[in-house]
């Protein structure tokens, strides 16, 4: 996947946060337009006006159906025109309280 195939495309990102015991503490869904790549990072402009957000990037993304409509669990917002999807699970550091 190269820069030309992803810049200007919409991405939907799901983040799931787990506590030390593995229980879900928070789930967030964000979407926006991919704006740039840096070494091992993909950046997109959040559609909610929250600015730029980055996720780890290894050169691969899951392809979405841009004709599908996705309903965000966190807000109920309907999102269409999604080209790529990424999801991440964030584990609480066992050394943190």
Image (tube, rainbow, N blue to C red):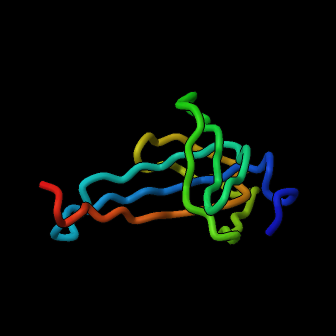
Q: Position of residue 68 (x, y in %)?
A: 69, 57
Q: In the shown orientation, is residue 86 left or right of residue 64?
A: left
Question: Is residue 61 toward the left or the right of residue 89 in the image?
Answer: right
Q: In this view, does 85 lie above or below 50?
A: below
Residue found at x 59% / y 37%: 52
| Residue in front for this viewpoint, 7 or 14 | 7
Rendered position, 1 above or below 11: below
| In this view, 34 is above or below 20 | above
Q: Which residue is drawn at 73% across and 57% down?
A: 83
Would residue 42 appear left or right of 71 to someone viewing this image?
A: right
Residue 34, given in percent of the width and then of the height, sits at 71, 47
Position of residue 9 measured from the top left corner of the image (x, y, whole percent): 77, 50
Report the residue at 82% width, 64% height from top.
2
Outermost residue, left direction?
97
Q: In which quarter of the image is the N terminus?
A: bottom right
Residue 21 lies left or right of residue 53; in this view the side is: left
Of 50 and 28, which appears nearest the observer? 50
Kindly identify the residue that appears in the image at 48 percent across and 57 percent down. Answer: 14
Vertical arrangement, residue 51 with respect to residue 32, above or below: above
């Amino acid at each position: 996947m190269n820069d030309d195939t992803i810049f200007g495309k919409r991405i939907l990102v799901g983040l799931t946060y787990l506590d030390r015991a593995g229980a879900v503490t928070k789930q967030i869904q964000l979407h926006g337009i991919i704006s740039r790549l840096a070494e091992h990072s993909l950046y997109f402009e959040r559609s909610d006006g929250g600015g730029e957000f980055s996720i780890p990037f290894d050169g691969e993304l899951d392809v979405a159906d841009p004709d599908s409509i996705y309903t965000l669990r966190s807000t109920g917002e309907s999102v269409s025109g999604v080209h790529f999807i990424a999801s991440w699970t964030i584990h609480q550091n066992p050394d943190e309280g």
